[in-house]
Image: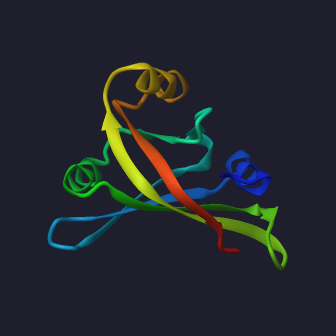
Amino acid sequence: MFVEKFYDCLKHDGIVAVATASKDAKAHVVNTWNKYVIVTDDEKLLIPCYGFRKTERNIAENPYVEITLGSSDVMGYKGMGAGFLLIGTAEFQASGPLFEEMHDKCDFANRVMVFTPEKCTQMI
């Protein structure tokens, strides 16, 4: 699903935005950095969480998530800067092999958000 340019973005500085919605349809967005994201062999994204409490509550009620990420250091369609929109579902884990993999990389993480993409589109 992921193209090489997507992986290039993750290798460079950039921000990741995770958008969820509450049961009363209020949007909520949290951020992390590209350097913290892990892509598993089956192309799930592991995102470290220390806060993300409202995000976790929203996902418990509605697992639909949209994520954007990018980097100004990667060549996009018309110059420097490439970014992606990912659509899929997510869940939180506080134990198990995926949590341990994330915690080994980011010892501040007390949970991991496991994102399963359904679609990945380069936007810029």
Quadrant for residue 122, please give it. Answer: bottom right
**Left or right for 27, reference 120:** left
Q: Position of residue 101 (x, y in %)?
A: 51, 23
Q: Residue at x 84, y 75 (%)?
A: 79
Q: Position of residue 15 (x, y in %)?
A: 57, 58
| Residue extending furthest toward the left | 24
Q: Position of residue 120 (x, y in %)?
A: 60, 61
Q: Position of residue 41 (x, y in %)?
A: 62, 32
Answer above or below: position of 2 versus 78. above
Labels in figure, total: 0
Q: How is the image coloured?
A: rainbow
Answer above or below: position of 104 versus 48. above
- Viewer-side residue, 73 vs 100: 100
Quadrant for residue 42, please give it. Answer: top right
**Left or right for 112, reference 68:** left
Q: Residue at x 74, y 54 (%)?
A: 3
Q: Residue at x 49, y 28 (%)?
A: 102
Which quadrant of the figure contains the C terminus?
A: bottom right
- Viewer-side residue, 116 vs 96: 116
**Left or right for 72, reference 25:** right
Q: Residue at x 66, y 66 (%)?
A: 83
Quadrant for residue 9, please give it. Answer: bottom right
